[in-house]
Image: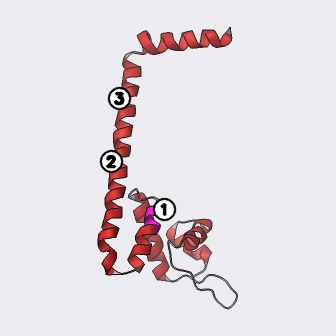
Amino acid sequence: MTIKEMTAKTGVPSATLRYYEGLGLIPKVPRNSAGIRDYTEDYVQWVAFVQELKKSGFSLEAIISYIELAKKGKGTKQERKKIILQTKQTLLQKIRTLQHLVRQADFALNNYEVVVLPRTEELISKWSA
């Protein structure tokens, strides 16, 4: 299938498909006699796999590392598992950061009249002066 058909089937833009190929996130796509990429159903599965990992919070770098290790064989399965664990730890840290930010927003809301508003007005008055 052409890149246009692949885009229609996967919902992934053609530029992204070329980018994924360039990064090694999907195997090199064979070309037909006219030099046009000729995707198979296997590529649909590869793109779906990469998209699933991205939706699970994996960075592109982590996905690349995971795939590179997988290409080396079963002996790398523990290293690949470590990448999943590292991704989970990164996500948990992001959650902690977001929870902290929510607490800060709660403080600002709960203390708007006595802390935030007076501070804002003080700073604005100095700005205008």
Which residue is depicted at the point 49% across and 9% down? 118
| Majority SS type along the magenta span | helix
Element under label 1?
helix
Question: Residue 20: which quarter of the image?
Answer: bottom right
The image position of residue 4, as x and y in percent, is 61, 74
Residue 128 relative to residue 38: left or right: right
The relative height of residue 92 versus residue 47 in the rendered view (above or below) is above
Pointers 3 and 1 in contact (CB under 8 A)? no
Question: Where's the N terminus, which quadrant?
Answer: bottom right
Identify residue for label 3: 103
In-front residue for pair 79/125:
79
Residue 10 horizontal side relative to residue 127, left or right: left
N-terminal-most mark, 3 or 1: 1
Magenta residues?
60-64
Residue, disc 2? 92
- Is 28 rendered above or below residue 54? below
Q: CA distance from mark 3 to mark 2?
A: 17 Å
Residue 22 position in % (x across, y down):
59, 72
From the image, tell me which residue sits under label 1: 60
Which image quadrant for residue 65? bottom left
Task: Estimate the spatial distance between the alpha carbons at disc 2 and disc 1, rounded to whole Å.
Answer: 18 Å
